Image: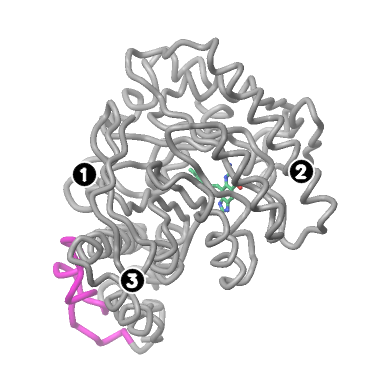
Amino acid sequence: MKFDLVTKDPLSKARAGTLTTDHGVIQTPIFMPVGTMGTVKGVHQRELKDDINPDIILGNTYHLYLRPQTEILEKAGGLHKFMNWDRPILTDSGGYQVYSLSANRKIKEEGVKFKSHIDGSYHFFSPESVMEIQRTIGADIIMAFDECTPYPCDYRYAKRSMHMTHRWLDRCITHLDKLPFKYGYSQAFFPIVQGSTYTDLRQQSAEYIANAGAVGNAIGGLSVGEPAEEMYAMTEVVTAILPEDKPRYLMGVGTPINILENIALGIDMFDCVMPTRNARNGMLFTANGSINIKNKKWEDDFSPIDEMGITFVDTEYTKAYLRHLFASNEYLGKQIATIHNLGFYMWLVREAREHIIAGDFYAWKEKMVKQMSQRL
Ligand SMILES: Cc1ccc(CCc2c3nc[nH]c3cc3c(=O)[nH]c(N)nc23)cc1
């Protein structure tokens, strides 16, 4: 995998880049739609390509391991073939999902024992086993097996957990070196910085991850409920240490404003469940703030969903119609809102890229942050 930095912004640490993988090119800054179970919920792969056009989507090791299970994915020739998506895919390693989804899990040095949220059966993830699972899923970018510390968490716990994440990282790398690619294309491996919201731990973890010399690096342990200011402060500390010539992925972030602020701090890749999850709840993001389409005030508003929207739903349907679909619990409503929100997130990061290249990103960012803070 190759990463070329196209340009840098004079007034911030924002960068525009191009990431080349065996399944295609990724223009950064990029937003990666979450496709947990091998689908971006409610959106056909054809709509995804034609109307939202993300350079890369995310899959989930935890979910795919439990269902359809790795042997099915292997028989299919990997996740790309299974879901008929021939562009890049990134999979998370499953640690975070065990911590956030499984009722009772036991984290030990060896790995994590957990109960399936589907049928209650017991399973065990280790750095070695999730490297094998991610080889079989076949994503273009795979993540290290880490422990995402909860927020808040005390210093001692954060320190112990960070050192275990570093030992797990070494085990991932050692094991990965023994596992050939399964489907004839290469897979890039990203380690993950932890350290909770403690500056000294974040610096230690960033140094350790930078020394691993991977082709890309991720920042974990954030977007777990901490105040935005703490998220920005930790991002600043870590991006000062991570190598400039490698892509930086801030996991689980975030709102449109979080994304612009973190682009200014030198982040290149983002993922978040908000555009898809909030869409299913009738919450629409726009350049002028957010809209709760279920609100009665839209029931006779026959204006387009979003005059400045970039997807077909924005101009082909009215606010009144979309509100009606939500009021009647019609699943077309969720589909329309999902396409709108993902289209808005793609527009936002593409606009950011253009302004970084034009050299006026900082002023544009300040204007957008104000504009998007409105409640419509
Ligand atoms: C499909 C998919 C869903 C979600 C993710 C990212 C999930 C995610 C976080 N989400 C919010 N904060 C997060 C922190 C971490 C983290 O520290 N480590 C890992 N491995 N994942 C995180 C990746 C892929």
Q: Which mark is residue 11?
A: 3
The first of marks 2 and 1 along the sequence is 1
Give the SS element for disc 3: loop
For residue 228, what is the image quadrant?
bottom right
The first of marks 3 and 2 along the sequence is 3
The Cα atoms of the two marked residues, 2 and 1, are separated by 39 Å
Residue at the spot x=47%, y=55% of the render? 273
Amino acid type indicated by mark 3: Leu
Task: Identify the residue position indicated by label 2 in the image.
Answer: 161
- The magenta region covers 298-320
Q: Are marks 3 and 2 in contact (CB under 8 Å)?
A: no
Amino acid type indicated by mark 1: Lys
Q: Could you classify mark 3 by the number of other residues whose Cα lies within 10 Å: few (under 14), some (14-19), or many (20 or more)? A: few
Give the SS element for disc 1: helix
The first of marks 1 and 3 along the sequence is 3
Indicate whether residue 301 is drawn in magenta.
yes
